[in-house]
């Protein structure tokens, strides 16, 4: 979508008469990629569905605040990322376990998840990713799984491209070490 097409689409999203139909289109265009992004953070299918739904509700309620300083997709990714991270933190607090322990519990359940279609190598990769600090996990998942470029990730996480490249490089090295030792 060109910049002018996106601007026109945002106007439809922000106009009361076209908002609902434009949002149905927005959901259709972004549902799949946002689901997989959220799923890479929360890991559980049902939780990912819940967070995805809440992401679109939040976007619907706040579209009037979108100023066009970034791409609409970057804005949606930012909402989804923040909501998914908050969700995971809230779940770990509810279970009265550390974030690391909560993530380990979810990883242990991933093997029996009927919606997880990865093999043993993919499961090992997820375990390696779980050992990374939160920021490195996000950068790695966005770059590796969603195949987002550094500019897009920069807009989503509101950080410099240089910092992202460094985070990705460190994440790769740590994952490589983890995989070699397992």
Image: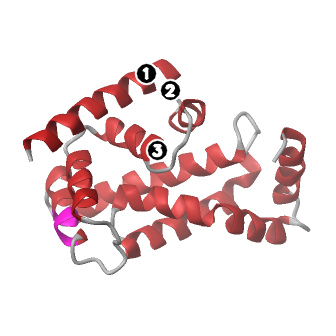
Please tell me in which quadrant of the rendered image residue 14 appears: bottom right
Labels 1 and 3: the sequence-earlier one: 3
Residue in the picture at 71% in, 47% down:
72
Is residue 108 in the magenta section?
yes
Label 2 or label 3, whichever lies nearer to me, is 3
Q: Residue 76 placed where, x, y %? A: 61, 51
Residue 73 versus residue 20 in the image, above or below: above
State left or right for residue 64 relative to residue 2. Answer: left
Is residue 12 in the magenta section?
no
Circles 2 and 3: CB distance less than 8 Å?
A: no
69 or 177: which is nearer to us?
177
Q: Is residue 19 visible?
A: yes
Q: Residue 161 placed where, x, y %? A: 52, 23
Magenta stretch: dominant secondary structure: helix
* Residue at the spot of label 1: 163
Q: Residue 97 placed where, x, y %? A: 13, 58
Element carrying mark 2:
loop
Label 2 or label 1, whichever lies nearer to me, is 1
Residue 28 versus residue 152 in the image, above or below: below
- From which residue to which does the magenta span run? 105-109
* Residue at the spot of label 2: 159
Circles 2 and 1: CB distance less than 8 Å?
A: yes
65 or 151: which is nearer to us?
151
State left or right for residue 180 relative to residue 172. Answer: left
Q: Is residue 160 visible?
A: no
Circles 1 and 3: CB distance less than 8 Å?
A: no
Residue in the picture at 33% in, 63% down:
43
Q: Residue 166 placed where, x, y %? A: 37, 22
Residue in the picture at 27% in, 66% down:
119
Element carrying mark 3:
helix
13 or 139: which is nearer to us?
139
Q: Which mark is residue 142?
A: 3
């Amino acid at each position: 979508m060109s910049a002018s097409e996106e601007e026109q689409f945002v106007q439809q999203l922000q106009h009361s008469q076209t908002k609902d139909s434009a949002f149905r289109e927005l959901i259709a265009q972004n549902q799949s990629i946002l689901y997989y992004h959220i799923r890479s953070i929360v890991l559980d299918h049902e939780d990912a569905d819940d967070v995805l739904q809440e992401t679109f509700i939040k976007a619907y309620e706040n579209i009037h605040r979108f100023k066009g300083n970034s791409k609409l997709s970057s804005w949606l990714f930012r909402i989804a990322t923040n909501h998914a991270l908050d969700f995971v933190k809230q779940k770990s607090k509810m279970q009265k376990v550390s974030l690391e322990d909560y993530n380990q519990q979810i990883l242990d359940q991933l093997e029996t998840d009927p919606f997880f279609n990865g093999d043993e190598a993919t499961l090992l990769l997820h375990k390696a990713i779980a050992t990374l600090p939160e920021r490195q996990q996000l950068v790695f998942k966005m770059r590796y799984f969603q195949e987002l470029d550094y500019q897009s990730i920069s807009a989503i996480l509101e950080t410099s491209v240089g910092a992202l490249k460094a985070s990705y490089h460190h994440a790769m090295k740590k994952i490589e070490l983890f995989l070699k030792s397992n």
